[in-house]
Amino acid sequence: MIYYLLGTLLLLSLALNVAQYRAKKERNAGLEYMSDKLNAIISDRSSERLLLVTAETELRQLLIGTNRLLSYNHELMSDSAKMSLSMRRMLSNVSHDLKTPLTVVLGYIETIKLNRALSSDERDVMLSKVQSKAEEVLALMNKFFDLAKLESGDWQLERRRIHLNEVCRNSMLGYYDLLTGRGLEVSIDIPEAPIYIYADDEAIGRILDNLLSNAVRYGYEGNVIGLSLRQDQDAAYVDVWDKGRGIPETDMDKVFERLYTLEDSRSSSTVGSGLGLTIAKRLTEQMDGKIELRSKAYERTVFTLRFAKPKFEYNAAASNS
């Protein structure tokens, strides 16, 4: 009986050792596969993941954790590539935007300096153009500083109750002479009943200025630029629109990106810095608003601002109308 028990224990021990050996061998093989595969993925910068069928709980957990790290690393690499592309495009765009007016400035200065036969009137015209181009450069630099302040949180907005109708009228008035001077039709739809929101009036003015500037630059071919103001019970809406060439659907998600401009406009006379819409979006979001874009070429391209307002403002306006 004793020999029988000893034999049974010996067999069990042997079976256990065999099982442990197999488990260890499987674990080592799994770890070796993971190590080799991981090195290959890192070396090739591929988006592959580790695939391993195993009954080892610890090995499965390690596999899951490693794949999560690989996914995170792939996202970082993708973001880094996008950022690198954005930076290269930014440097190209900024170089173009600064070089063009500065080249004009230098040309006029050289003409004024070398051409002694210029009349006083001709000299004044050239100096006015030099000033205009210098102001373009200053405006571009100011946009860079504005965006930097927004992204760093240094631009603190002062939100208070503002008369949105008046802000819209003043913004459109600032562009009226420019628009009519270019032969463009101006469409204004601002109700008499006051619409109030809680926002920074200077920031709202800056947003509208950027949207109108964008409409003039890219929508002039439609021969009409418009601004309308409306409200419902929950919010106030401002539409800035044109009937120009529009924005392709593939670009609509990108127009608010820093320094993004339509590629076919980069070498044209309508070129912009690609900062105005980014600043408009950041300012809008800082005031808990939303900005949306809809576009159909030569029919209607509209940027819509939405700002929530207290319900009592709507009720008061409704009772006065």
Image: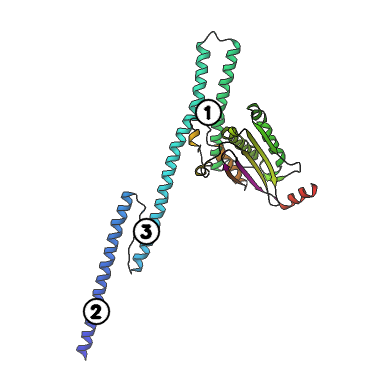
Q: Residue at x 25, y 81 (%)?
A: 12
Q: Are marks 1 and 3 in contact (CB under 8 Å)?
A: no
If you read the primary sequence from the N terminus, does the residue marked by circle 1 or circle 3 appear first? 3
Please provide the residue range marked out in magenta: 295-309
- Indicate whether 9 appears above or below 216: below
- Around disc 2, counting alpha carbons within 10 Å, would you say few (fewer than 14), some (14 to 19), or many (20 or more)? few
Quick one: 271 or 133, which is closer to the camera?
Answer: 271
Q: Tell me the kind of residue under disc 3.
A: Thr
Residue 19 pos. (x, y %): 26, 74
Name the side, left or right, on which 30 lies relative to 149: left
* 297 within the magenta span: yes
Kindly identify which numbered label has been placed on residue 216. Answer: none
- Indicate whether 120 appears above or below 175: above
- Indicate whether 130 appears above or below 294: above
Residue 303 pos. (x, y %): 60, 42
Residue 307 appears in the figure: yes
Name the side, left or right, on which 321 lies relative to 65: right
Quick one: 237 or 205, which is closer to the camera?
Answer: 237
Q: Which residue is mark 2?
A: 13
Q: Give the main secondary structure of the magenta stretch.
A: strand
Which element is circle 2 on?
helix
In the rendered image, the quadrant that contains the N terminus is bottom left
Which element is circle 1 on?
loop
Residue 92 pos. (x, y %): 45, 33
Which element is circle 3 on?
helix
Q: Which residue is mark 1?
A: 269
Q: Residue at x 53, y 13 (%)?
A: 112
Residue 153 pos. (x, y %): 56, 43
If you read the primary sequence from the N terminus, does the residue marked by circle 2 or circle 3 appear first? 2
